Each structure stands twice: as structure tokens, then as C-alpha cells.
DNA sequence: ACCGGTTACGTATCCCGTAATCATT
DNA sequence: AATGATTACGGGATACGTAACCGGT
């Protein structure tokens, strides 16, 4: 929200109404007795105090994340069985699953593709721990919460493409693309995802192939090219200002994806972590 | 609460009912999917996961505290005018004020002593920003919240008096007392406080006088003696296990002190900080 | 039987969404 | 007009306290 410079856009990202966001901010401002945002007609901007609070909020967020990871690592993790509808499961989810696996290596994930209806039914029957489908749940007894929709972003060094918020595949090709090696699970997931929206991977000039995401991110930070990665894999660097995220023109995976689960069921620790991961706000 | 090893005692400290504490803990345990406390018939004990969460909670608390201080330091602070009833204002509050001033040096505090009724009236009339009195508020339009009651504790090195939770003034005298120099505001406040409950300062053998509290705390940590200080001045070291806090036999300042203020009024940033400081739970 | 934690339930408060309002371009 | 934030108000969830309920010494 601080980065977005707009309460209304932040509200969309947070799946909240604009007044709700205003109220939250007002509450915190009253608590501190200071304005945290300057309101302009075109949006909002952090004040000095706002910057301080924002920086602390990031530190605290990091701590909470570490805490969850550390608690999660304490015991052997049981398998999480995820049901997903075909489009979601084939194109959107694989990147997300991969990003989660990076953070929680101990978790064992199993993904099964079924129709939207079948997914919901099997979630109700406890065959799946949770489901990920397009559109909200229709079956009674299921709770559906909207997920962060965007899945893939282009990243570049902060200096590249100043002022731009999106780039075309051709511009990415000009700059040169850093990707995983052919055959890597994520590479294939990304290729499938791009193909699905009509962007062939061959339109993108691959400048170098690397084996780890960290290597790609470092290379991009150093200005060696751009990359296409899941939002969830780069959110920290983007927040830190180490990388700049741009949307890719022509790439719109904005389906309103929903996480569905049995409200009454108590989930395993790993399932809970996965669900929080899926619904976590990426920017804020 | 983790240190107390008892939900019911923690509830008292937090001014909550026991079921409320149980419910809070249960909520967090459900969120993580792990037991954080082992329940025994004689009380509770942190599990492995509980220790992890507890350590992170402390770190986060520290961050929040720093954040408040940093935000508070951003602008020049206005004066806080505090009204207090005679007993509270003369014996209990001075140490607290001093501890607050240590943390928020930029704040200017003014303390005025009046009868309980007069304090409430002047808070209503906005003559005082807030009041501190014994017992709850009686005037309509005033909100009263209970304050942390205990004000002075003995501290010693963690190894001294193993297993003890309280010491007599004579035992303190044997070990030798480290205090501020005569004439220091806190020294006088403490003397007044002790005299009020019938403990003369002359019963305590002063081993050394030092000019700063940090010097006293360091000396006590190193085992050079004991000291009597406001709880609020040593809470961090006690939580960290660097110092051990013991109650002093015969010293019972447990009056149910209440902070009162106009609910409708919006307080200055510094007044808000002071109020949160007063009602903050010391152990938890 | 007592101490300590849990369960059950009624109430008060908080937080969100809808709708109306204000301000700026 | 249109965008974007604030205010007003009704409904649902949350969190508390009281009281009744185990389970272990």
C-alpha cells in the first residue's frame, strides 16, 4: 500500500473495500498520533513518520515469516494434497507451488487436476486438503477466499526501463532473458503458462541459462538482463528495491482464483502454512 | 505468561479472565497447528515450538518498542500534564515517571497532586491530559484502565538466592545495596516509597552509590550486590535472564491503581505513548 | 475437596461492506 | 464528470466475562 501510493488500489490487492483501508490507516495514525500518509488528490504518499513505521512493518513481517518457517520445520511435515481445476493447475499453480517449496523445503506437495466441481466435491470429502479453482465455491460447507491472482512478472535491475510499469515480450528479448535450464520444472511451468496466453518462448531471446533462481536474481540485480519469475519468488527483492517488477504486455493470468477448503476441518500445520502463503498479500 | 508457567496468574497480570487467556493461546495454537504449551496439573510449560514462538514474540515486541520510540522522536514533544492522587503521586508514580523519561527523553512531564475527585474533575475539564488514581473512575465520561501495580523490585545476579522469589530487607543489606547517589530524584523517590511502607533506608546497607542506572544494573549483573529499582527499569534485563527480580518482603505497593482519561479526547502522541507505557504488561 | 485449565453461552465491541458525501482535476 | 478519500450506518464476526465442568493431586 505504501508502494502503491493509492488506498483504492491497495484495497483491491487486499481484497478489501476502500473505506476499510482508510479506516485501518486512520486507526494506526490515531494510535501514533501522527499522519502516516499525506493525502493528495492523485493518491497518497508516505510521510517521514510513515516511512519509519513502514520500515519497521517490513522487519516485523520478515520476523513473522521466519517464525512460521522455523515452527514448520520443527516436526516432520505431512503431505499436502491439493486439488486444482485444469487451467489453474496447469498454468498458474506450478509456479506458486515451486515458490512455496523454495521456502518450505520440508513440505511434500501433491497436486491433482480435476474439474472445478470434482475438486470441490473431493475437498468436502477430505480427499483433498484444499482446492484451488477459478471463481468462488458453489458447494455449501466450503469456504472460498480470493487468492493473489498475478503469477508471473518480469524483473529487471531497478535502473532499467525507468518509469515503465510494463514491457512487451519484444523489449524483454532485446535486453536478453535469464532463465532456468531447459528441463527445469519451473522453466517448463513458465513456458506452459506463456504458451497458454499466446506468448511463445521462442519470441524471447535467452541470454543465459542458470541452474538456481538465486543466481538468476543476482544476475538480474547486476544488470545482466531480465527474467520472468513468479511474483512470489521475487516479492522480497522487489520490496527491498533490489529488483524492479514489471507486468508483461499480453500476459494476463488474472483469473479470479479462489482457495477453497472445509471451514470445519482443522488443517495440518503445513496445510495451514500453504494456505496463508497462497492468500498472503504480495505488495502492501 | 511463558515465564509465569500459569494461565491463571498470567490472566491476573493481564487483567483478564482465565478463560480469555486460554482462548487466546488456543487461537494461536490453532493458527500454527502445534501445541505451544504442555498442560500439567500444576501449571503449564512451553513446548519446543512454544519456545520458538516466544523468542520471536520478544524480538517483535522489541521492534514495536523501538518503532514507537523512533516515531515519537520525530517531532518535538509537547508537555504531558499528569494528575495523580496523593499516595500514588508521591510514592508509586515517581519511579514510573523516571523509567518513562529514561526511554523517552524528549518528553516533558508535569505531575500535579490533587485529591482523587479533583483529579477526575480536571481530567474531564482537560486541565490534565490524564490522571492516575487509586480505584476505578467514578465520574461519567471518564474511562479507567487498570495499571501494572507493582512498582519496586529487588534485583540481583541470576545466581544469587537460587529458587527464592522474595527477600527480606535484611538479606538485601547482607549482600550490599547498590543505589543512586543521595540527592538523585529516583533515590529520593525510592526512599519515600520504602518509608511509606515502613522500611527505612537505613535498614539497608549501601555498598556503593553510582550515578547512572545502567552502571547499577551492570554492577548487579556482575554480582557486586543487589539493588532496588522500578520494575519498568529492569523488565528487559529480567526477561533476558541477565538479572533476577525478587519481591521485597514487607513491601506491598499493590494498590489497584487506575489510569483515567477522557475517552472522547484524542491525545497527543506523547500522551498516547505514556498511557501505553503505563498499561503495558511487564511480564508476559 | 481444591487448584488449574477447558467448555458453554450471553453480551459488547470491533471491523467490514454499502451507500452517500466531499474534494480535486 | 470522474477519480479518490472520508463519513454514516447496519450486520457479522470476534473477544471478553460468568458460570458450569473436568482432571489430577
Image (spheres, coloured by chain):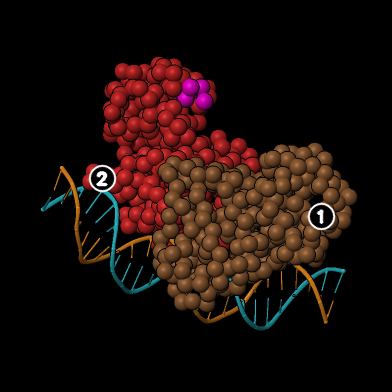
Chain colours: A brown, B red, C cyan, D orange
Disc 2 versus disc 1: nearer the observer: 1
Instruction: Tell me the distance, in whole angstroms, between the alpha carbons under discs 2 and 1.
Output: 64 Å
For the N terminus of chain B, which image quadrant? top left
Label 1: chain letter: A
For the C terminus of chain B, which image quadrant? top left
Q: Which residues are magenta?
A: B214-218
> In x, y percent, where is residue B43?
27, 44
**Residue displayed at 52% across by 39% down:** B59
D24 is higher (above) or lower (below) than D22: above
**Residue displayed at 37% across by 57% down:** B23
Q: Is residue B216 magenta?
A: yes
A121 is higher (above) or lower (below) than B235: below
Provide the residue designation for mark 1.
Answer: A202
- Label 2: few (<14), some or many (≥20) within 10 Å? few
> In x, y percent, where is residue B281?
43, 46
Examine the rendering and report whether any part of residue B75 can be seen. no
Predominant secondary structure, magenta span:
helix
Q: Which mark is residue A79?
A: none
> In x, y percent, where is residue B34?
40, 49
Q: Is residue A23 magenta?
A: no
**Residue closer to the observer: A138 or A55:** A138
Task: Answer with left or right where residue A139 lies relative to residue A53.
Answer: left
Provide the residue designation for mark 2.
Answer: B40
**Residue displayed at 68% across by 40% down:** A212
> In x, y percent, where is residue B225?
39, 19
Amino acid at each position: 500500500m505504501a508502494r502503491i501510493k493509492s488506498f483504492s488500489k491497495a484495497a483491491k490487492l487486499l481484497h478489501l473495500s476502500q473505506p476499510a483501508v482508510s479506516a485501518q490507516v486512520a486507526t494506526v495514525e490515531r494510535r501514533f498520533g501522527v499522519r502516516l500518509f499525506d493525502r493528495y488528490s492523485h493518491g497518497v504518499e508516505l510521510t517521514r513518520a510513515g516511512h519509519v513505521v513502514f520500515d519497521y512493518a517490513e522487519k516485523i513481517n520478515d520476523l513473522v515469516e521466519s517464525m512460521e518457517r522455523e515452527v514448520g520445520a520443527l516436526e516432520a511435515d505431512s503431505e499436502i494434497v491439493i486439488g486444482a481445476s485444469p487451467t489453474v493447475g496447469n498454468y498458474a499453480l506450478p509456479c506458486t507451488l515451486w515458490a512455496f517449496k523454495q521456502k518450505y523445503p520440508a513440505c511434500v506437495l501433491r497436486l491433482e487436476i480435476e474439474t472445478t466441481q470434482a475438486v470441490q466435491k473431493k475437498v468436502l470429502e477430505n480427499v483433498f486438503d484444499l482446492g484451488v479453482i477459478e471463481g468462488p465455491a458453489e458447494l455449501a460447507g466450503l469456504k472460498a477466499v480470493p487468492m493473489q491472482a498475478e503469477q508471473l512478472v518480469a524483473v529487471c535491475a531497478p535502473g532499467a526501463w525507468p518509469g515503465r510499469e510494463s514491457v512487451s515480450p519484444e523489449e524483454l528479448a532485446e535486453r536478453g532473458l535469464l532463465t532456468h535450464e531447459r528441463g527445469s520444472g519451473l522453466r517448463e511451468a513458465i513456458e506452459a503458462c506463456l504458451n497458454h496466453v499466446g506468448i511463445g518462448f521462442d519470441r524471447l531471446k535467452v541470454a543465459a541459462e542458470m541452474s538456481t533462481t538465486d543466481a538468476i536474481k543476482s544476475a538480474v540485480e547486476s544488470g545482466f538482463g531480465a527474467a520472468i519469475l513468479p511474483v512470489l519468488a521475487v516479492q522480497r527483492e522487489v520490496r527491498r528495491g533490489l529488483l524492479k517488477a514489471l507486468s508483461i504486455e499480453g500476459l494476463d493470468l488474472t483469473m479470479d482464483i479462489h482457495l477453497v477448503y472445509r471451514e470445519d476441518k482443522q488443517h495440518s500445520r503445513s496445510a495451514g502454512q500453504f494456505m496463508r502463503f497462497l492468500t498472503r498479500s504480495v505488495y502492501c
